[in-house]
Image (cartoon, helix red, strand yellow):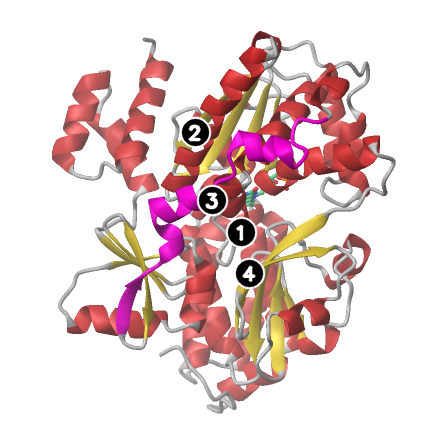
Amino acid sequence: MDYRARLREASKEIIERRIVSDDELKKIADKYGLPLSTVKTLSTFYFHDYSEVQVCMGLPCLLKGAREAVKELERRGIKYSITYCLGYCNRGPVVRMGDKYYTFINDEFREIEESRNDYVQSQYEPLDRYITRGGYKYFEKFLSENNKLFILELLVKVGLLGGGALSRFKTLASSANRPKYLIVNGHEGEPGGFKDRLIMERNTHQMLEGALLLSLALNVDEVIIAVNERFRNAKAMIEKALSELGQYLTSKGLLNKLPSITVSLVGSPYIVGEETALINSLEGNRGEPRLRPPDPTEAGLFGKPTAVINVEVVAAVPILLGNYYEGKEAVIEKYFCITGDVDRPGLYREKLTVGLDELLAKAGVKEDIKAVFVGGISSGLVHSSKIRVRLIPEETRKLGVFLGPGVIIALSNNRCIVDVMLEVERFFSHESCGRCEPCRLGTKELVDVLERISAGKASEEDLKWAESVARTMMETSLCGLGMSAGKVFLDALTQFRDEFEEHIKGVCRAGIHFR
Ligand SMILES: Cc1cc2nc3c(=O)[nH]c(=O)nc-3n(C[C@H](O)[C@H](O)[C@H](O)COP(=O)(O)O)c2cc1C
Ligand code: SF4
């Protein structure tokens, strides 16, 4: 094996076995003939906050009492580390102990049923059932199409693909530079998001059919499904589905005519979901973003043209194709993961014409709300006076939010916006890969100022400084993480400046705090 292949195998083993101890890392270094420092840097990058017991401090978990779970662990003398987004955000606060996931409710830790392998198996849709409900109905018809790019146009029509991505994908499809890759992004690290994991676990065949259809449209040679290493059940379901699919395609004489599909675990840090970081990770490097240009569609995985597409988008393709061949309107139901101050947190599936206020009502908004993170904390904070909008791209764009991850986190009127933003910026600071200064230093600076604002020890000058730091982060960060960290801070400051100013004077009108 050459150096790159050895690095890749070592990285894969470290991630799959969650190797963190020096003894084990030495064995890995010897096994693959790599310097200890190289394998150590991979392990510390991917498992920087790892321990046997981890408590999620993502905003949905904090809103449901993560601090109380921490106090209970301390009371019991259990060592823990804090982390972000263990999944199961609608069941927060979430705590992982070994291989098991718990929620903390009524002063006790209860295992989350959805996290158990037997439960996941029971929810899986096998191939025969998928075929009965219309799976692979139009696959061979599509295979015979001369120009397959129209399915990308369908994705654009329903708002699941942007115009820029469409033209890059078209260039990729016609590129003679081979091999070409499609990576299905199953990382889903956004706190509050759990739709992609559920699709991978339950609608596995629909996602695989979508991946095959897209691979044909994009004219790629290989499909890699990149799954967050925390979603081990999802990987198991994909492997099961791939085995069923292999037999089915062989029986149809199609197996050798189609690109191969493999599934790979990638490290869990939030930044690894960014597409160039995902590519770095799959190559065996630290999962840090790359400078652009070049765009991955020109030079991505192993320097070859690569399309990275989200799980939900991929899984939507068979439905859109079916509608197209049956002459139906191109519409799609989008998944929304709703958490925070609502009575019925969970997964909601709605047409994109649904109103944000209607959606929140369905999830049982408890009381008057103050604001909502729409698209997650990386997308934007929307004041309650602006929630009467339909969730179509034209309207959400005006709000400056991006629906992609489908994460909606509601904040009740009792919440302290300074508290919330402090936790949001702690998340970004914890997850910043540190590659560029605006984000590495800026996230720390925002946490520092917010801590002082929260403690009533900041001045008007501090607020102005934080504003300029956030603006610089938005304008000069290397990737979306630093940009988002600046942008959401400005969202909060612009819409709730009065609350920030009151804190400076030592006043907080909110009824609930995280501490
Ligand atoms: C910090 C960061 C984290 C991201 N995490 C994810 C993720 O977990 N899953 C995902 O599909 N896209 C994620 N993205 C977006 C990807 O870079 C990329 O745009 C996406 O995979 C393309 O999917 P699309 O089909 O929705 O356009 C992230 C972006 C950033 C900046
Ligand atoms: S913006 Fe943050 S996460 Fe992105 S490359 Fe820079 S330091 Fe890393």
Decide which of tag 2 and tag 4 comes sooner along the chain: 2
Q: Is residue 121 magenta?
A: yes
Measuring from the top left, give residue 386's x and y in whole percent.
Answer: 74, 73
Secondary structure category for the residue under label 2: helix
Q: Which residue is mark 1?
A: 482
Q: Label 2, on which residue?
A: 240
Asked if marks 4 and 1 touch (Cβ < 8 Å), the reply is no
**Residue for point 68% across, 58% down:** 401
Image height check: is 81 above or below 225? below
Q: First in sequence, mark 3 or 4: give its number.
A: 3
Q: Could you give the CA–CA distance between mark 4 and mark 1, rounded to whole angstroms? A: 12 Å
Up the image or down, 188 lies above or below 179; here it is: below
- Disc 3 C-beta below 8 A from ligand 2: yes
Ligand 2: does it lie within 8 Å of the C-beta at label 1?
yes
Q: Is mark 2 within 8 Å of ligand 1?
A: no
User: Identity of the amino acid at label 1?
Assistant: Gly
| Image quarter (top left, top right, bottom left or bottom right) of the N terminus | top left
Identified by mark 3, the residue type is Ile
The span shown in magenta is 108-137
How many C-alpha atoms fall within 10 Å of the one at disc 1: few (<14), some, or many (≥20)?
many
Q: Which mark is residue 377?
A: 4
